Image (cartoon, rainbow, N blue to C red):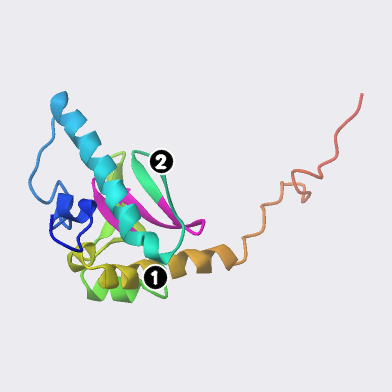
Amino acid sequence: MQPGKSPATSLFGKASRCLHEAGIALQSGASTQRRKLMSSDFVDYVNELLAPLGSVRSKRMFGGVGIYINDYFCALIADDCLYFKGDDDNEAEFAASKCPPFTYEKDGIVHAMRYYRAPDEAMDNPMEMARWTRLGLAAAMRKAVAPKPKSKKTPTGASPKSRPTRLG
């Protein structure tokens, strides 16, 4: 291990490539176990990389991992790729750095979400990672303080909680 490098950094070296972009096809059986181990290591690596920005917590969800910093949901990990939350204020920076959005397929349709892959250079550079993490964290904080949409009214105009109940 090189001086000044953490075990996670040494483990991943250039951890910036996603498994699917590196051309690694994982099958069932032993390869599935290998992928689970790699994903756990990658999550640990990301948690360590983001730790200087606050209290980092990761939570498995929907086949991926949600990343919270100071209880703000600001990033996700899918297929061993880190994606940061985007919004109207920061999407131009992600686009300028050619960061692709997180996509998933449902019913044969590809959907893009407002989460953008961390740039490759940020995966091995804590200062660069801090910059991108702050963008995602700021988007999460803006969303948290944004006014919530009003609840829909029932056809009679009463809210569902205050609707009168018929007795007898």
Mark 1 lies on residue: 134
Direction from residue 106 to residue 29 in the image, left or right? left
At label 1, the amino acid type is Arg
Q: Nearer the viewer, mark 2 or mark 1?
A: 1
Mark 2 lies on residue: 61
Q: Which residues are magenta?
A: 67-83
User: In which quadrant will I find the N terminus?
Assistant: bottom left
User: In which quadrant will I find the C terminus?
Assistant: top right
Considering only vertical position in the picture, is 123 above or below 26? below
Residue at 28% from the left image edge and 41% from the top image edge: 40
| Closer to us: 13 or 97 | 13
At label 2, the amino acid type is Met
Q: Position of residue 101 (x, y in %)?
A: 28, 60
Residue at 24% from the left image edge and 47% from the top image edge: 80
Say which quarter of the image contains residue 16: bottom left
Q: Secondary structure at mark 2?
A: strand
Say which quarter of the image contains residue 85: bottom left
Is residue 110 visible in the rendered image? The answer is no
Q: Position of residue 141 (x, y in %)?
A: 51, 66
Q: CA distance from mark 2 to mark 1?
A: 23 Å
Q: Which mark is on residue 93?
A: none
Question: Mark 1 or mark 2, which is nearer the start of the sequence?
Answer: 2
